[in-house]
Image (cartoon, rainbow, N blue to C red):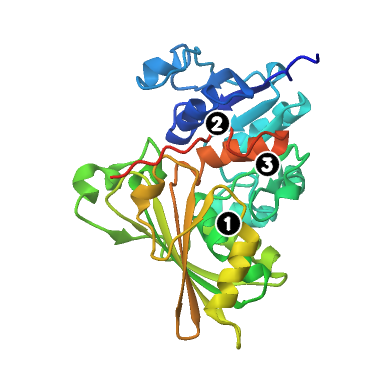
Amino acid sequence: MAGAAAPVRVAVAGATGYAGAWCVALLSRHPGVQLVQAASRSHAGSTHQAVYPASECQLVLLPEVDPSGCDVVVSALPPGEAARLAPLWLNAGATVIDISADFRLRDPAMYLKWYGEEHPNPNLLLRSVLAMPELDPKAIEGSELLALPGCFSTAALLGCGPALREHLVGPEILVDAKTGVSGAGRQAGQGFLLSEVDESTRAYGMDGHRHQPEMVQAMSDLFGEGCTVTFVPHLVPMVRGIVATCYLRLRPGVDLAAVKRAYQSHYGDRPFIRFSEDPAASKLVSGTNLCYLSLHRQGDHLIVCAVIDNLGRGASSQAVQLLNQRFGFNPMAGLELSQRWP
């Protein structure tokens, strides 16, 4: 009898930020994975559990990942860092799954515009895949450099993807999104203190948000021609979650029943997409990789409400979903549902 397949050896870079820590938690319980390294410059020498008491990971944190001992590097580093280190990881034969923004935009000029510095390795941009498991799974297979869409982009793309791909709507999209404070990361400043955000909601990024060019690029790819996206995020007083309400103009003659058929055709067998008649509450997806979608019509507009956990489907659990797709695991491996209500 043939022996069981060797586990995929995974390292997490940036393992003590919110996204990295959640990756460690998920990968530690993945049946096909051996978590072999966790790296954190700020906490090197401590165990992961010492930094996160709820963690079950006893690995001692390294200052840097050693790619020679792993098959996959999941990077949850700040923008710019993964791009500087990715050549080292790739040259050692590791597949790279990047949660940050370093490989999302194909045009290095757009990276400079939105992130304020030249891309450290622009030659890698054409090698990367902006990975969307439900919308373009074949692009993930065999790829060595996978980029996650941003959390807002993930919600908007899942919400708008089938309508754009089937040309049920026009190319002008408006996305209004609400998010919790964890999206700012563990080192967030004064504007994210409890006393600043409690019982208060505010819009931000009015002159443009970094996830907007990602949406334009990916939605244009889905539509087959240029799309325009108006995007306004809002900060709301909760820890986790994104509620993205997307407005699209229906093509003449397209009714809501046709839209629902298209979405069921695209997503009907996808385990992480759920449909609801009414918009879902953000708490329903907390701690999961789920995306809840509800489809509505007002006049000649299609309104899609997409609800995800920004740290889950918008970052860490989506990274595990990509790993599952890339290495042929069951899509649910390591991502068993743990919905919490209330």
Instruction: Look at label 2 and name its amino acid.
Output: Gly
Circle 2 crowding by C-alpha within 10 Å: few under 14, some 14–19, many from 20? many
- Specify which label sits upstream in the sequence, 3 or 1: 1
Q: Mark 1 points at which residue?
A: 113
Q: Which residue is drawn at 77% across and 26% down?
A: 93
Residue at the bottom extreme of this rendering: 252
Q: How far apart, in angstroms, are the residues tagged by discs 3 and 1? A: 22 Å
Q: Which amino acid does label 1 sit on?
A: Lys
Residue 251 showing in the rendered view: yes
- Identify which residue, 291 or 152, lies in the foreground: 291
Q: How far apart are marks 2 and 3 (CA)?
A: 19 Å
Q: Is residue 283 left or right of residue 248?
A: left
Residue name at image x 60 percent, y 45 percent: 148
Residue 334: mark in rendering: 2
SS for callout 2: loop
Of residues 170 and 332, which is closer to you in this image? 332
Residue on which the image places disc 3: 146
Question: Which of disc 3 and disc 2 is earlier in sequence?
Answer: 3
Residue 44's x, y, as percent? 48, 16
Look at the image and tell me in which quarter the N terminus lies. Answer: top right
